Image (spheres, rainbow, N blue to C red):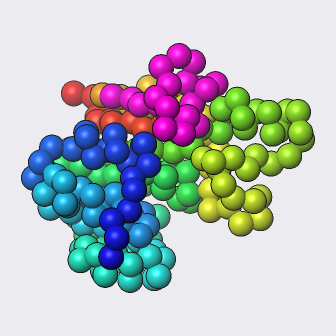
Amino acid sequence: MAESVLRSDQKVIVDLIETGATVLDLGCGQGELLNALVKKKQVKGQGIEIDDEAILHCVALGLNVFHDDIDRGLSEYSDQSFDYVILNQTFQQVRKPDEVLQESLRVGRRVIIGFPNFASLSTRYHLGVRGRTPVTPSLPYQWYDTPNLHFLSILDFIDYCKERKMQIVKAFYFAGTKRISILPNLFAHTGVFLISRLG
């Protein structure tokens, strides 16, 4: 099976994780990121995915992936049992993001979260000027078939971390393949955050 080309947000996640780390990828999809981590960083990786077809694809890649709904919690995992828990393009799709993130921080020493920025300039243009639900490269779904349940911005997430006493260790912002460093809430399509509990 041909190796997939990673997106910019996935590449930065691969760079963040140390060789040989233990990783739990929540909502791992077809396993592109998990597969890259296993091959490039020799991680001890495990995935959780709800879509049966995606799981079959992961199994064909030789990945260790379980069928489960992450909204039901991670009670089968002990505290700090992984170096990293990944929620990339998953956080905005779960029904109870606050509970999922608290559980992720319990199970993982650090959590990596990536999500589309619903306050980007292109999104604002679609809503404010065209009067339409945004369909952009980072939000490629029509309103009637989107898996996204929560619409958050980069600033929303930063404020949320402060309120919940979570430390943002590192943050990366992207517009397509370009890294954004100025006014990310306006110009970035995607944000990736490495977080941990304070202290």
Q: Is residue 36 above or below residue 178?
A: below
Q: Residue at x 39, y 29 (%)?
A: 171
In the image, 13 versus 164, the foreground residue is: 13
Residue at the outermost left position: 20
| Image quadrant where residue 65 sits | bottom left
Residue span colored magenta: 170-189
| Image quadrant where residue 52 sits | bottom left
Q: Is residue 41 left or right of residue 8?
A: left
Q: Residue at x 12, y 48 (%)?
A: 19
Q: Residue at x 21, y 27 (%)?
A: 199
Q: Is residue 86 above or below residue 121?
A: below
In percent of width and height, residue 44 lies at 15, 61
Residue at the outermost front position: 2
Residue 106 lies in the magenta-colored region:
no
In percent of width and height, residue 112 lies at 34, 44
Residue 184 lies in the magenta-colored region:
yes
Question: In the rendered view of the protein, which quadrant contains the N terminus?
Answer: bottom left
In percent of width and height, residue 77 lies at 23, 64
In percent of width and height, residue 113 lies at 41, 44
Q: Is residue 185 above or below residue 4?
A: above
